[in-house]
Amino acid sequence: MKYLLVFAVVMVAYWIWRNNRREEMAARAAPKARRAVAAPVTMVACRVCGTHMPHTEAVQGREGVYCSQEHRQRIEGPPA
């Protein structure tokens, strides 16, 4: 009889743990489902070093795109 009682207590504890775990996993999954996917961004390579960066962060020059003003000046010279 004592072993039956211990078995019942262990089964109830397992059932409570499993239900709490399911709720926790559902709570974690919910925010991920709501996240909006950002639109793809065009990537460009610096003409000097080849570093890839988003087009919005690149420095536009007369002869191409660069990762910094220093690289633009290296190819094109100082601004006029």
Image: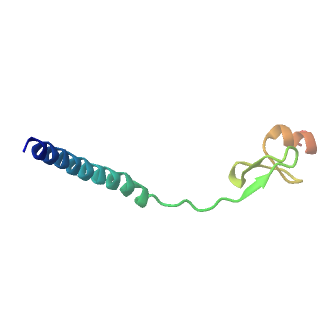
Total of numbered circles in the picture? 0
Q: Which of 25 and 46 lies nearest the eye of the viewer?
A: 25
4 lies left or right of 32: left
Q: How is the image coloured?
A: rainbow
Q: Residue furthest left?
A: 1
41 lies left or right of 60: left
40 lies left or right of 58: left
Q: Quadrant of the N terminus?
A: top left
Q: Residue at x 52, y 61 (%)?
A: 37
Q: Position of residue 3 (x, y in %)?
A: 13, 43
29 lies left or right of 62: left
Q: Quadrant of the C terminus?
A: top right
Residue 79 visible (yes or no): no
Q: Which of 58 and 25 lies nearest the eye of the viewer?
A: 25
Q: Which of 19 and 56 lies nearest the eye of the viewer?
A: 19
Can you tell which quarter of the image residue 68 is in? top right
Q: Position of residue 16 (x, y in %)?
A: 20, 48
Q: Position of residue 61 (x, y in %)?
A: 84, 50
Q: Residue at x 79, y 46 (%)?
A: 51
Q: Position of residue 2 (x, y in %)?
A: 9, 41
Q: Residue at x 72, y 54 (%)?
A: 55
Q: Residue at x 34, y 52 (%)?
A: 25
Q: Which of 3 and 17 lies nearest the eye of the viewer?
A: 3
Residue 76 sits above or below residue 63 on the image: above
Residue 36 visible (yes or no): yes
